Amino acid sequence: MLNIVVALMPEAQPLIEALSLKRRADSTAFSVYSSPSCNLVVSGIGKCNSAAATTWLAALGANQDQVWLNAGIAGTRTEPLGSLFCAHSVEDQAQAKIWYPVQVASPLLSKPLLTTDAPVTDYNNNTLHDMEASGFISAALRFSSAELIQCAKVVSDNTDNPVSAITEPLVRELINDNTPLLQQYGEHLQTLADDLIRPDIDRMLHEFTSRWRFSVTQQRQLQRLLERHQLVIGELTTLPESLQKLRSTSSVLSWLREALSAVPYENAP
Amino acid sequence: MIQHIYVEREIASHPRTRQICDKFPNATIIDCDRYTSVFNSNAQNFRLQKKNPSLILARKHQNRVTATPAGYGIGGERNYYFSHMLNCLYDCRYCFLQGMYRSAHYVVFINYEDFIEDIKKTAADSEQPSWFFSGYDCDSLAMEPVTGFMKFALDEFAKQPLANLEIRTKSTQIRDLLGRDPIDNSVIAYSFTPDSTAKALEHKAPTVSKRIASLRKLQNHGWKTGLRLDPLIYSESFEQDYKTLLHDLFSHLDAAKIHSVSYGPFRLPKGFFKKMVKLYPREKLFASVLTENSAMVSYQSELEQYCQNFVESLLLSYIDESVLFPCS
């Protein structure tokens, strides 16, 4: 699942259209748009709004290890309008705090990003300037892994094109022109996230938990034992009679441990 | 290929920093205050980073030389390790680094002189010889073309007869070693598991046959050489696999010239193991016959003993007991 956090509707609109997202009726605090593989929330301007919207979106049902992308516009001194960068560092100017979004084989060029509390006209050389990223990143790190949390910014203002000249149509155009690259970037991040999907043992787990009542600790042990079983012996499609006869949950766990202890490691490249 | 290099501001203008950065002209340089703000930050995933680690250049301020854990050594009384680098180019699935560090980025400490100074001081604390192990938190040679650390260190160790250096590696980066005279107080030690285990678990590492070829060249050049069979990995074909490995090793190497052989069972601190399982839930090695006690995860004691006894007796058919060192 790709979760996108944007500040304003003109930034969101091209992405909503390209990704065929539909407005969610159950989201009241922020406007949220969804498809089976993507959520987008419109946060409003500023880092507090961005943090709140990120948290709101996560609370609507995000699982661990999902992709989180803060997409939007940013200013920089010299880069031409419409250039797209990801951020390899995000500094909160007011807090003097810095994060380093981990870049794993990123297809985008990267730059440092400074989040300020007010629009900036005096750009530091080589640095992107926005007003949301630090809020987004500090919140998103509670829900996913640093490699899957990124900020991608399209240059909307520079020394020749001041922030005062930004208009809604311009923003829409800049994001729209970069939508294919943003989608590609989202897919790249999703490929990374797919690597973290745990083995699917839901059917087996359901079989066991509907037959026996395991404590919370035992459920954790059961989960790993079933993962191991699936890996080295195979899926337990039907429960053997010797297992079905057992009454206590501890004897069920022992049965699984014993079955697994009989199987040595086999090298398989 | 390194795409990003984090550089501590403090060492940004150090000549060694510049030299290393120049080797990656297309990399993006990212400045940072301390390497720990990148390397130790929360919510990182070692497995994802291992796909394309970045390089971090830093200064190591303290604890540059540390006593080894008990049971780690090759016969010396005074054993220390040092790490001019953290993390490894290779991706061995049994490696404890995956469980120890949050990040898979390569950290290179560029203040080589300070490491050598501390080594000299530690060695000078006693009239007895000391051993310094370099391949504890990294492979000693794999990044040598980038760091040049061993080239630097060997020149210094050559002047310190009471300081012995173990260079532990799986790397075939031996050009510098073959281009210089061997020094008497250094051992080049290669780590091995049987070929089928290496293929399954030692990702990105040179093949067993290439390692043997490198070791043979080093031995022929006059370097003291060692074998490290740690960890011993049990599998269905354990006996045959280790027979084949040792046969291959000793048919290419002069057993009489082997300085030391150490071996030890597969074992991990419990916390590291749990983290590794979380990173690689589908890894069969972690799903195999392992047992947990209060602090460690290892094979059940009978199996562990069997593995060690088998390999030990096999080794003794090739080498003298005096060069054999079990690790625990």
Image (cartoon, rainbow, N blue to C red):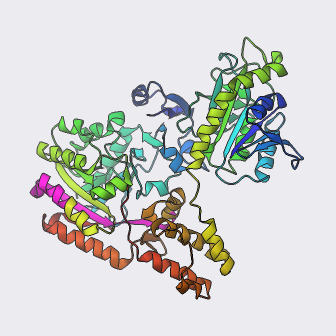
For residue A39, say whether it is visible.
yes
Magenta span contains residue B264: yes
Find residue A155 and report its horizontal and vertical position in percent: 70, 22
Q: Which residue range is magenta in the image?
A: B246-271
From this view, report whether residue A6 is shown above or below residue A82: below
Quarter that holds the N terminus of chain B: top left
What's the residue at 11%, 45% (across, down)? B220
Q: Residue at x 27, y 39 (%)?
A: B173
Quadrant containing the C terminus of chain B in the rendered view: bottom left
Q: For residue A190, what is the image quadrant? A: top right
Q: Going by the image, does B111 lie left or right of B73?
A: right
Residue in front for this viewpoint, B304 or A130: B304
Give the percent coordinates (x, y) of residue A125. Answer: 64, 20
Q: Position of residue B290 (x, y in %)?
A: 43, 72
Instruction: Name above or below for residue A267 compared with residue A111.
Output: below
Q: How many marks?
A: 0
Say if residue A100 shows up in the picture. no
- Residue at the extreme top: A160
Residue B232 screen position, x and y as percent: 31, 65
Residue A199 part of the magenta segment: no
